[in-house]
Image (cartoon, rainbow, N blue to C red):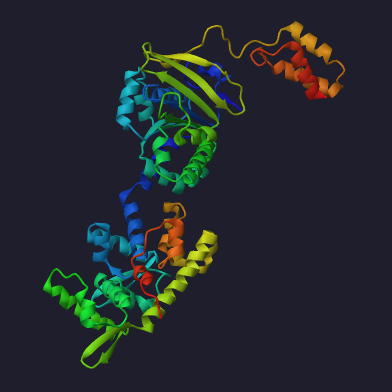
Amino acid sequence: MGGVGKSLEKTYKKSTDTKHVEILAVLQTVTNYPCLNATRIAEKLQVNPGTVRWHLKKLEEKHLIESVRQGGKIVYYTRGFVVREDVEDIGFLQKPEVRILITRIARAHGASKKGVLDTLEMNKPSMAYVYIQHLDNLVDKGFVRVLKDRKMNYYYLTDKLFKLYKKYSEIEVKIGSAAVRNFNGILPELQPGARAALEEMNFREGGMVILITAPFPTPGLLAEYKLRLNPLWSYQEVIQPE
Amino acid sequence: MRKIKSGVPGLDEILDGGLNEFSTTTVIGCAGAGKTTFALQFIKKGLETGTEGIFITLDENKEQIIKEAVAMGWGEILDFLDEEKLVFIDATGKEFTNFIKKELPDFVATWRGVGARIAIDPLTPVIWATKDLYEQRELLSFLMKETRKIGTVLCTLEEHGPAGNLTGAETVLPMYLADCVIHLRYRPLEVKPYRTLKVIKYRSSRHSENAHHYRFLKNIGLVVIHSTGETFPGGKLPEPMRVEILRELGTLPKEKHGKLVKLLDSLTMKDIEGIELNILIERLREYFE
């Protein structure tokens, strides 16, 4: 039998092919940062948005990810990790300014509008407008409520927000703790798309990916495996429901 | 186990006939010791005997190594490359690590037992691709276990720290995991530089325990020159000694006697060097009783 060397060369080239590596990076980003659009995924990866769109299309064809049109933009998430009805909320809560606002309100539970906005660093006057808009949106969506006392408005986080966190914490605990037990053991518990995505990435990272890709890892898990923090999760640390 | 020629003149004798087929060998040495040359000679011998060669290079690029091989007087390397009998793979530590984890098992499943010669030069970047010691060990053990299913593997390893110090993590791990470890000791900074080669371990084979001088010869590469007065593997036991042992242990039952004769046939003078005859007889008696 001949040709073992040539075959190895071919296999090796395939494994180091940039396209192959890129598509996995896109999949990992969609999993780590659910509900972003192609442009923002491209920003995170510092790749051409066209390339990202092409990979997203391929991933969607293989049912590894799903997309939904939302306010004129198409956002993506890994199948099985995000419940479709929450896509809009998670997409909104992912915005950096919204995250900052929630963190501030959580720190000073019952802060006034002035109190919330004063602590923010605003380089441009237009930023104040963006924050006020987002604060109003938070109230509209029911994540923050306003209590009026004479002429002052005081802001509080609502149960709706905590319930959303709790819901995803439970998904995470299920995925996370199962992962600690045994990676293979959890596979049947997941939807097929998420399963394929996990298997794919797990090979690449030598078994640790599942913990990274759990959408809301608990501090314990992160500490145990010295993993980086999921950005969606980061404000959960600050907010403790009363 | 079948022995195959190592490609280094004089080395096969030290290794009791050559390298075991389907095993992994690690060659350790500092800069200038001749690790890459060793690997090239190993691949060359295989190609000359009709075995395919795979040279995985992690430091230098393919062209550089081919150039060196041609300069070494091995012009035929170009023919082997044309015929695709020899393949070079330019790898980096991280990429190769990914390859090992992801693609290697499938690849091995397809090509198991084909009997190619594989050289990995050097292995050090693969070890350094992960920081975690446990992961390093797992990865290396997996690499060695899997690749030797395809053929005979030779990895080279850089020696870090003071010359002759083999206690660093990047040398200790592969030494434990490989089937055969050959240490190329080179002291370039002495007034009169000298090079010696020593077999540190060799699973399921005899090997010389001495250090042997080696030299670079033009158009050949590494050549081992035996240290004075040493013969290896040494001749068979002289007849009078054989007769004496058989007479002393004459009371053994027939079946055990057969085993003893077989053992005496396989022993060489080298094996029993420095053991007094009466002590040898005592030990054999204890073993067979």
Relative to residue B71, is residue A118 drawn left or right? left
Screen quadrant of the N terminus of chain B: top right
Name the residue located 46 percent from the left edge and 62 percent from the top edge: A221
Image coordinates of residue B169 in percent, x first then y, are 46, 36
Image coordinates of residue A105 in percent, x first then y, are 29, 78
Of the pair B147 and B112, the residue shown nearer to us: B147
Image coordinates of residue B284 in percent, x first then y, are 77, 20
Q: Residue B124, relative to residue A48: is it above or below?
A: above
Q: Residue furthest bottom?
A: A150
Name the residue located 45 percent from the left edge and 53 percent from the top edge: A203
Q: Residue B21, relative to residue A68: is it above or below?
A: above
Q: Residue furthest left?
A: A125
Image coordinates of residue A124 in percent, x first then y, are 12, 70
Residue A50 falls in image quadrant: bottom left
Name the residue located 34 percent from the left edge and 33 percent from the top edge: B59
Q: Residue A120, relative to residue B127: is it above or below?
A: below
Q: Residue B166, relative to residue B132: is it above or below?
A: above
